[in-house]
Amino acid sequence: MTDRYVLEIALHWAGVGLYVAATIAFVFAVVFARPRVLRWAMAAGALGLVPHGAAIVLRWVAVGHGPYMLKYEVLSSNAWVAVLVLLLVLVRRPGWSALAIVVMPLAILSVAIGLFSNPESRELPPSLRSIWLVFHITFAKVSAAAFLISLGSSVLLLLRERPSRPPWLERVPDVLALDALTIRAAGFGMIFWTVTIAAGAVWGNQAWGRYWGWDPIETWALVSWIAYGSFLHLRFFFKLRPRPTAWLSVAAFVVFLLALLILPFLMTSLHSSYFS
Amino acid sequence: MSLPRRTGVVASTARRLTGFLRRPAVIAGEVVAFGAASAIAASLPQQPDAYGIQRFAARWPALGRVAAALGLHDVVTAPWFLGVVTACLLSLVAVQAQQWPRLRRAWAASPSTDTLRGAPFRRSAPLSEARSVPERPRLDTAGRAALLGSPVFHLGLLVLIAAGLVRTMTFRDAAGRVLEGATLGTGVGAFEAERGGWLSRPLALERPISLREVREERYASGSLKQVAVRLALGGDAGSPATEREAAVNSPLDDGPVRLYVASAHGLAALVEVAGPGAPEAVVVFMEERGGEWRGTHRLGEGLELRFRANVHQRPAAVEVRAVSGGLLLRMESLAPGSELALGGGTAARLHGLRYWVQLRASRDPSRPLFYVGAVVVILGIILMFSFVRVDTGVFVEADRLVVALRPHRFAPLYAERFERLCKEWLP
Ligand code: HEM
């Protein structure tokens, strides 16, 4: 184990530690209605981004490519972007801090799964050396963050809709606001996911001679895009009430998760050269 | 039947059909069906992966039979899939025919005290208590661009589907392994394999293309970093050839054909096997396995020649082993010009070592259409979700100052904005 790797892992765990502290503070602030603690929660979260970001940059410099080849790199960097996006949303809308109760644990879980997977670095094969890959990956990470916010909002909505709910749930935004946020965040996710797929198509055209080839991984990306499209259609056309809307949002997120993080590591496809 | 009556029947059938195609349940069904079909295509092995399909059938015989009977191993060319795509296309046309005129009307509409009567955010105070009172009603609208979102997005989808259909019918792809020094001729069939849509013509290069050199770049660890080629275009009929470079991710356009360099490449041994009969010239294509170039040539009667070379630099020699029934008979390091005796008067002589690379060629008239569609879809989705039309009004009604805010979507997210507006005007 090299010194660099030890430092990278230590920085990762420092980030995770701060995220855990932030999560506890968020829970405390929301459950016990302590708005002052919220500032500490935000500060701990923002501070966590520093060692976590440093770990990602350290590896980037050492392996010579961005965080998009190994499960370890992908999960860790996705979590970093998700925490950043969450904090940016909360800076503008502190009233939404309950979102952190859903988003932060999932981000921490993502880094932890990454840390327990094989960290052995691999070099970038020729087909991945394209500027379009940078767009493809960057937008995928931002869309994951936006969909995660949408998921967080639907989970809070479902909890709030339960007949026997704890009193703190009364303090999270009301059901209609959560419903609107679920759709709005899914909409932003769709913007970034659309660009992700389009950038992938341009890159596929450069690397393999076709913009679309029904390769399993690219097709799953399309399926998840259509899953969100179907969810938004159903909600729009049938004026769905918040509860079914929230369930559909959870279902669309599951399809997205399959497409982005699970199937690429399991299926044989043209993309297999870089997911391992 | 008289002519006007017949026209009337046609018009009413068309009206009923467009009405049907615009029905929410129909549209939702089409989109879900397209998604489900894509999920099947992504989950089951698809043509031309014959080996994958065979393996699937052997592993799950019942599922394999069902999949084969329903054509689920070739989803994207199955008639039912094309039916779903056509239905989507028709619905999109029907929806677009309604969306654009509606957009014009919606765009022109401006907020009035009447339209703001049902605004979700509305507060009033007696004029005497208002912070200030505008001289004339202040009616404003922002984020009109949002209205463009859905029509533009669905127009982009229409273009993308059209691009997909054009591609299905007209694309032509070809691929083949090409040796350094070899030339791809201008005739049809220059590549090893070729496929295309129903309306596509066989691919033919406009001028011959010779592969002058394959250059590979490796990381210090030995793994592959880049494969680039130097090509000579033309050069027949006495005209000088033009030299051009291409590489993985850096294709080359020559007329309507685009040439791609694939990562698949390797070393080729040019061998002549001479024995009691006529000498046989063979090209042994080696591929990278376990950090080495490796390839095999079978000579018959269980005898095979196994070739091996280091991948790090262009090799000057290869190790050749003659193996029969798993038993090593002979082994030699051969440089071009030397030979390995195989016994019984037979020998394998190495004539040369060259790199080979897989070159792909493609002609796809749908490409520009696809790019236009993608840009329009992105623009549409940005307009749809980054902009929200919001009408605001500050006006006097029955001796009270009214402040109203009417977001056309996501109303609950505008409570804070409304409070800020109220703070400006109301106590
Ligand atoms: C058969 C093809 C399709 C048709 C006929 C269709 C039609 C429609 C219609 C009529 C609307 C209502 C909005 C309006 O009237 O302006 C709509 C909204 C929408 N559609 Fe489609 N659509 C199709 C495919 C898709 C696909 C494939 C996606 C994305 C994956 C999509 C995404 C959306 C979105 C995001 C909305 C807005 C929903 C909202 O405002 O909440 N559509 N579509």
Image (cartoon, rainbow, N blue to C red):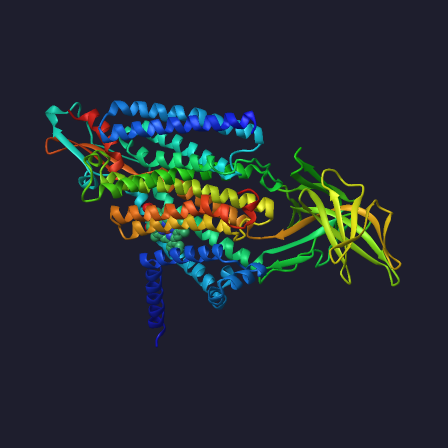
Q: Nearer the viewer, residue B216 or B223?
A: B223
Question: Which residue is the extreme one toward the bottom?
Answer: B1
Report how many numbered discs are placed on residues in the image: 0
Q: Nearer the viewer, residue A53 or B258?
A: A53
Residue A60 visible in image = yes
Q: Residue B111: x and y, percent?
A: 24, 39
In the displayed structure image, the side of residue B218 where residue A10 appears, left or right: left
Residue B410 visible in image = no
Work out whether B104 lies above or below B28.
above
Q: Nearer the viewer, residue B143 or A234?
A: A234
Quarter of image, res A101: top left
In the displayed structure image, the side of residue B294 where residue B347 appears, left or right: right
Q: Residue B59: x and y, percent?
A: 51, 61
Q: Nearer the viewer, residue A197 or B201?
A: A197
Rendered residue at 39%/55% (across/down): B31
Quarter of image, res B276: bottom right
Q: Residue A63: x and y, percent?
A: 57, 31
Q: Residue B222: x and y, percent?
A: 67, 37
Image quadrant containing the N terminus of chain A: top right
